[in-house]
Image (cartoon, rainbow, N blue to C red):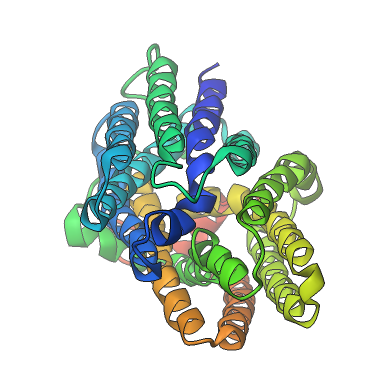
Amino acid sequence: MRVRLLILASAVAMLGWGAVLPYQYAYAAQARGWGGLVAAVASTLFSVGALIAAPVGGRLADRFDPVRVAVGAKIAATIAMGTLIWADSPTAFLAGMFAFGLGVTAAGPAQSVLVLRWVPDTDRRRVFAWQFTGAALGMAIGAFAAGFVVDLSSANGLDWAFAAGALGFLLSGGLIAAAGWRAPVGAAYDLGEDPTPTVTGLAAIRAIWAVPALRWTALVTVTLALGFYAQFESGLPAYALTDLHVSAKAVGLAAAVNSLVIIALQMVMIRLTGKRSGPTLLMIVGGIWATSWMLLGSAQLAPELAAAIFVTTFGVFAVGETMYAPILNPLTAQLAPEGLVGTTLGVFTALQTGISATGPLLAGVLLGAGLSGVFLGLHLLISLAAVGAAWRLRMVIRRPASPVTEGVTSPVDQQQRVLGLRS
């Protein structure tokens, strides 16, 4: 029951955010008339807030009850989203987006720790998949509904979506609190480790980076994030609106299709890939990302089909997401040094969101200069780099290694703990 509530919490939180996410760039740039720079900086500040909050949230989840950490972060996200309703200046809007990034991301590592704490190791990949599917379902419903009622010609045209987002995060926090109501606070992770961290601060970071497999996992995380997620919120919608000249409704439809494909394929993909190596699947994800960028480039050759190609590309990206989401968190957690699961998840979330902060700025510079071909080609190369990094990760995991520094599990021992890594 607790796990079901966690999955439901993910879906509810994304319901309102799905109504906002596809339109935030156009809202700030066009409806409010603040320009593309403010819209891009808003997405960047969201990511900067996430960059700050992720390791802090992960560290708090290691040291305190992760239920309380997650609920507190959800309340913070609720307040931040609510302030966007009254944000009538660029400064207020940017501050609200920054605060929202803090609240949303601080909850992520704590929720992952709860899955690790409450779910047997053999079921974790499936539960992470369901959690991601729940979030995608909420996102799809929100994005699809908003496409018919969002008014980007009005300065108040997104207010109801901000209100729905605030309510969604408040309800999400309540569901997590209910899930943890009867949970034993001192329950240990089902990873054979002591939940009390033995190292702190910089020593914790050094312990994490001392594991070679985690270093390669970090590179995979960065390249895959930059190859798609960094552009999902603003870069891709901006490219569609300014270069492909598709409508705002088509952008909303693309976001909805992305989520619906995830919902339709997620459990099927888990059954098909359940015994496959995690790094191998991440190599496939990089390949799908690369294919998607090439498909997106073809839209410039057929302007009359640009909207259809753009929507289809978001569906292709989603196929990769069905493998990415269930793999990365369990893989990272199971490679983590003892007692530092939450901290490791927080650090890797910070990496993902930190690199995502560069995405809107990169898109703004390249698209603003009319270099859409460079924009597409660069992300194709980044996606191919992710394939290479995932291949190297697979080699490191398979290679026998000697123990590393004191206080850190040896790579050999960690490899034995990683479920489903070997083909």
The foreground one among 141 and 54 is: 141
Q: Is residue 304 above or below residue 185?
A: below
Q: Position of residue 227 (x, y in %)?
A: 56, 71
Q: In this picture, is 419 found above or below 186? A: below
Q: Residue at x 52, y 21 (%)?
A: 5
Please state which of residues 248 and 117 is positioned toward the viewer in this rendering: 248
Q: Is residue 13 left or right of residue 304?
A: left
Q: Is residue 51 left or right of residue 238?
A: left
Answer with the quarter of the image where residue 211 lies: bottom left
Q: Quadrant of the N terminus?
A: top right
In the rendered image, the residue lying farthest to the top is 182
Foreground pick, 209 / 373: 373
| Relative to 385, 299 lies left or right | right
Residue at image position (56%, 63%) is 237
Instruction: Say above or below: 333 vs 404.
Output: above
Identify the image quadrant of residue 380. Answer: bottom right
| Residue 58 screen position, x and y as percent | 32, 46
Residue 92: tell me if it is visible: yes
Residue 254 image position (x, y, % from top left)? 68, 54
Q: Position of residue 362 (x, y in %)?
A: 43, 77
Residue in the image at 49% along x and 63% along y: 234
Q: Quadrant of the C terminus?
A: bottom right
Can residue 399 be seen here? The reply is no
